[in-house]
Amino acid sequence: MGRLLGLMFFLLPAFLAAQVKLTLIDKASGQVVEGAVIYAQGQNGQIVAQAVTNEAGLTSISIKDFPVQLLTSHLGYEPLRTTIGVAGEYALALDPAQKQLDEVVVTGQFEPQSARQSVYRVRTISMERIQAAGATRLQDVLNTELNIRFSQDLSLGGSNLSLQGLSGQNVKVLMDGVPMIGRQGTGNEININQVNVNSIERIEIVEGPMAVIYGADALAGVINIITKKPESGRWSGSAKLHEETVGTEYGLKQGIHNQSVSLGYSKHSFYTLTDFTHNYFGGWQGSAEDRDKEWHPKTQWLASSLAGFKTDNLDVYYRLDYLNENIYNPGLFSGIEAIDQRYITNRFMHQVQGTYLFSDRLKYNGALSYTDYSRQIQTVTVNKNTGDVRLALDPSLQDLTQFDGLTFRGTFLYKVSEQLSVQPGYDFNVESGSGGRLAEGISSIGDYAFFVSSEIKPNHWLSFRPGVRMVKNTAYDAPPFIPSVNAKFQLTVKHDLRLSYGRGFRAPSLRELYFYFFDASHSIEGNPDLKAELSHSFNASWNAKWFTSSDVKFNTALTGFYNTVDNMIGFGVKPGNANITTYLNIEKFKTTGFTWTNTFMYKQFELGAGIGYTGRYNQLIETGEVPDEFLWSPEINGSASYAIPAIGASVSLFYKYTGRTPFLATDVTGLIELNETEGFHWADLSIKKSLNKKFNLSAGVRNLFDVTRINNMAANGGPVHGGGLTRPVGYGRSYFINLSYNF
């Protein structure tokens, strides 16, 4: 009985919290505002609660101590700050004439803050942008972003990205700040299309090395996927059906068929959220014949569940994400038999994250994550006459790769004064793998690091953030110190300048260290003596807000970068045995370039336009007859959207031109020659209409220019000898429609 009374006494404050009920409306049209985030800030300056308005513009927040300040955030409205002294019902009118571009960001920050106040330039992609694209995969969202490019691996059914001209091995992909394990068990080669796009609240992208905070494999930058959290004080849920053609192909077993459902609940200190998604892609015949397909059919099952507990000083939650992916590669019949393959991926990602506020000056944030990843290659023979299916007898046609990843990281934030904050932290990572043609049975790498950074604000116009990371790795000699320094200058009220330098490194993967594959056609082994790739990176950005009137906004951003990478890992001949191919530190690589982006808004109309120019250099250039040190490639992108509040509709267009991309390859005689991949245009168009307060209908066209493959060609116009004749880009112009229900 005493324990029960003690428990009731402990929980009593949570049930005594007063309810503040809010209705948010559009000041111009009088319509309700859905998806607005409301932050409640206590007298100590800390965020004590937050909530999101539903389709009726309603939400509620539990508040214990008054007065509190309420701050609203929505991409389509000017932020509003107001103070309330007692519980009750309040109506807040938001001005739609100005749009809030300075979203609250968390990636690389000491604590959540405005993107404009951050020493990093953080690019944010909102949930509204994801929905406007009608996206079924993350690539649909990032495809038209500057400085990001994709290459398709049709044999394995994956997509690889590059950032600032550096490959996806150098891009750290995070989920809620925790590293993900990728398609081949290496966290630096994540297949981003294995992420559930329906669970994303927003995406934050920071370009440039983030090694001090996030460790290895973040030479090019970080992509942080922020997942949805349940709305405060209520049940909430959604369901969505998405149908799409694949080029001109559509049917029960053709095209794209996606279904998703989510259910969340938040009451007092407890919150939970569960969602399920099924993705079916029927493949695309393309130029393939008979049973074969140019793009392989794929089925995905994705699920996640979250449960958390939050008080004034504590916020802790557990999250589980599950992926099952099955890619089917049907073969052609040779006589009466065909060889079919399936690539089956399973991934469980467990997270426990928590924040504890010791005082107004001291806060702790910690995360513990465990990922269990497996990828199986299953090969069978199919009898044409009988339909009999049997496992192929050749053991080299079967494979099972398993990887486990454990991450334990935490940071302390101590505010010495308004001008100085210090953040020490630790980051422990252990990754083990087996199978997948790895030598020595089970292999593992341990990476143990401590880091410290500080943010110094000597005056209102300067923020200065130095940092250093100390690393111990069990598999290779890691650099003992990884430094970085970032500075932000507020030149005027409307102009900001950011400068940064960072030392980055990429750890050799387990596959590069311990790979072992010998058969009649292959002689490849890993190299346990590999060194880490090391980089120096310089980044600069200038941001200007030219007009900020009630009717017009015009913003400009100019960025530049320079990266140099030493000890880049590549394939080479094993010293002492020319018959064996291995991994060696043989290359030097550089990238440099700039982007110029502009955003113009007038009432309900928004227009974006940008250009980018990226140069790449590697050591092969020193041995080939190439006129310039850097090989350059341009990009142009644009977007346009128009909202029609009177009928609850909006129209969005996204466009990108990827220019010709030069690359080096060896010809049939072994000489280095300059080739190039031709440029192409990509555009997506969508229309969204609110049917009522709960139902929304979207329809659109993807890949308006009907791009499927682009040609590789010699720079002099002759035939190409290396890199293949064509490169896959898409499966043709497609049409989609989706219906969503929210409550």
Image: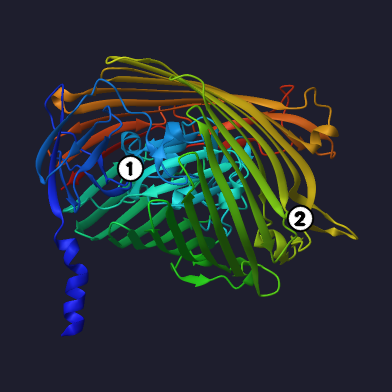
Q: How is the image coloured?
A: rainbow
> Can you tell which of label 1 and label 2 is closer to the viewer?
2
Query: Where 649 sits versus 54, above or below?
Result: above
Residue linked to disc 2: 531
Left or right: residue 268 versus residue 306 is left
Specify few, some or many for label 1: CA neighbours under 10 Å numbering under 14, 14-19, or 20 or more: some
Front-most of residues 683 and 54: 54
Left or right: residue 679 versus residue 472 is left
Residue 733 locus on image (x, y percent)? 40, 32
Query: Where 554 sits versus 439, above or below?
Result: above
Q: Earlier in the sequence, mark 1 or mark 2?
A: 1
Query: Residue drawn 59% across and 66% down?
Result: 431
- Say whether residue 61 is visible: yes
Front-most of residues 190 and 453: 453
Q: Amino acid at mark 1?
A: Tyr
Q: Secondary structure at mark 1?
A: loop
Residue 604 locus on image (x, y percent)? 26, 20
- Say whether residue 731 is visible: no
Query: Residue drawn 42% across and 63% down?
Result: 351
Report, in whole angstroms, how far the alpha carbon at label 1 lies from the one at label 2: 49 Å
Disc on res. 250: 1
Residue farthest left in this picture: 89
Front-most of residues 485 and 555: 485
Specify few, some or many for label 2: CA neighbours under 10 Å numbering under 14, 14-19, or 20 or more: many
Q: Secondary structure at mark 2?
A: loop
Q: Amino acid at mark 2?
A: Lys
Left or right: residue 371 versus residue 282 is right
Left or right: residue 268 versus residue 527 is left
Quarter holding the N terminus? Answer: bottom left
Image quadrant in which you'd find residue 619: top right
Residue 595 locus on image (x, y percent)? 55, 24
Residue 555 locus on image (x, y percent)? 42, 19
